[in-house]
Image (tube, coloured by chain):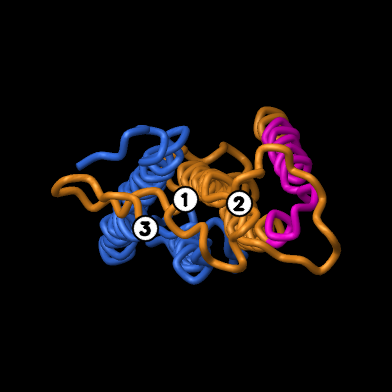
Amino acid sequence: MTVPGPGTCHHGWPRRASAGGGATSGREDHDDLEPGAPGVETEPDARYTLANERTFLAWNRTALALVVAGLGIVQLLPPFPGVPWGRHVLGVPLIAFGAVVALVAYRELRRNQAALRRRQALPRSALPQVLAAVIGGIAVLSAVVLLVSAVR
Amino acid sequence: MLPDDPEDLDPGLARERTRLAWVRTALAFAAVGAVVLRKDLIAGLVVLATCPLVWWLGHFASCAAGPELRPRRLLLVTVAVTAVSLLAVLVALLSHSPDSLDQLLPRHG
């Protein structure tokens, strides 16, 4: 057994402590991620699981940043002269997209973990492209709103 | 007593980095709460209350984490972010400030 640290909440690293378990017998040779036999699932190295968790949390922070950006546009900006709906058109889609990012991030967390358990390559994620497209679209929309506001 | 190899305790500082990621996420909730608070006191306090909750989730996670993923605990974060988004949409649309909602509605007369 790994010895826990003195007076801390660390329970030690379970990599070698639980090597006797049947499902965890292949844990030592994880660095070369070979595709396993189909249908065989083993618990991945905790480092991979934690990295997966951090990626998920990073996407959730991105989602919260989208919410803050949308709220800031709607609530803190002065209204565009001549375009009373301008702030809502820019802000509300950003906020709603934040919810979408959070939900998709959870689905991807599960997919990535399933791939890790099967020792397969991680599935491709559409989220970066969608995020870039949405931010680009909002930027174009901002330019349109500003132009309309300037013309009126 | 510490193990002979420090890598046994936390290889690549993966656990420490994950704990810090939880703290960053909790702070992000606090930032959203502060922005919501500017417009709606109740909604802002509700969002701010998620900050210590997420912080505690991360602390709890780093203390008791085994090698396996805990999807239910992470699902709580997704639920929280989704709820905050919906709350933010409501705050954005139903704000009391006269220059935001009234101009959105069609004017009669």
Q: Do tag 3 and tag 1 residues touch (Cβ < 8 Å)?
A: no
Residue designated by label 2: A27
Placement of the C terminus of chain B among the 4 image quadrants? bottom right
Residue B105 part of the magenta segment? no
Label 2 Cα neighbours within 10 Å, binned few <14 / some 14-19 / many ≥20: some
Query: Which color has been applied to chain A in this rendered view?
Result: orange
Residue B21 or A19: which is nearer the viewer? A19
Q: Residue at x 49, y 71 (%)?
A: B72
Hey, what amino acid is under mark 3? Ala
Q: Which chain is blue?
A: B
* Residue A116 circle label: none
Q: Residue at x 61, y 51 (%)?
A: A27
- In this rendering, does residue A55 appear at all? yes
Which secondary structure class fits the magenta region best? helix
Single out the mark in the foreground, 3 or 1.
1
CA separation, marks 1 and 2? Answer: 9 Å
Q: Which chain is disc 3 placed on?
A: B
- Which residue sits at x=61%, y=54%? A44
Label 1 close to label 2 by CB (< 8 Å): no
